[in-house]
Amino acid sequence: MNQVREWEGRCQRCMRDTDIHIMSIFDVALICMECWEGEKQHPSYKTASDAERSAIKNGDLNFKGIGYTNEK
């Protein structure tokens, strides 16, 4: 996902209803806390986090992430 969408009370990755969300480190999806916990175990999590940190340091406050793949 690379297009920001409004929060509608449903995780944009697993589609579960939830009242709590966070933006994915990989893309602009608004995800539930369970998906976020899974993201932190993703093999590319550090790469995604480093890329976001670098973009912000360089002034890119609209970084769309490196993209999410369902690797395990």
Image (cartoon, rainbow, N blue to C red):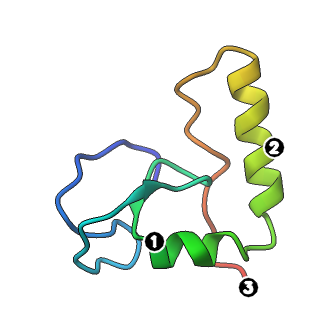
Q: CA distance from mark 2 to mark 3?
A: 19 Å
Is 52 situated above or below 9? above
Horizontal side of 58 relative to 6 (left or right) equals: right
Question: What residue occupies the far front of the structure in this picture?
Answer: 20
| Residue at image location 46% in from the left, 47% down from the top | 28
Name the amino acid type tagged 3.
Answer: Lys
Q: CA distance from mark 2 to mark 1?
A: 21 Å
Q: Name the spot of residue 29 as percent of width and height, x first.
A: 43, 55
Q: Earlier in the sequence, mark 3 or mark 1?
A: 1
| Residue at image location 19% in from the left, 64% down from the top | 9
Q: Which residue is mark 1?
A: 33
Q: Which residue is mark 3?
A: 72
Is 43 situated above or below 45? below
The crowd level at tag 2 (other Cα within 10 Å; few <14, some 14-19, many 20+) is: few
Q: Earlier in the sequence, mark 2 or mark 3?
A: 2
Q: Along the line of sight, which residue is nearer the eye, 10 or 66?
A: 10
Discs 2, 3 touching: Cβ within 8 Å? no
Q: Which residue is mark 2?
A: 50
- Could you say which quadrant of the image residue 63 lies in? top right
Q: Name the spot of residue 56 as percent of width and height, x first.
A: 68, 25
| Residue at image location 75% in from the left, 16% down from the top | 58
Nearer the camera: disc 2 or disc 3:
2
Quarter of the rendering occupied by the N terminus? bottom left
Q: Earlier in the sequence, mark 2 or mark 1?
A: 1
The crowd level at tag 3 (other Cα within 10 Å; few <14, some 14-19, many 20+) is: few
Is 64 situated above or below 28? above
| Element type at mark 1 | helix
Q: Along the line of sight, which residue is nearer the eye, 1 or 54?
A: 54
Nearer the camera: disc 2 or disc 1:
1
Horizontal side of 12 relative to 64 (left or right) equals: left
Question: What residue occupies the far bottom of the structure in this picture?
Answer: 72
Q: Name the spot of residue 71 as percent of width and height, x first.
A: 71, 79
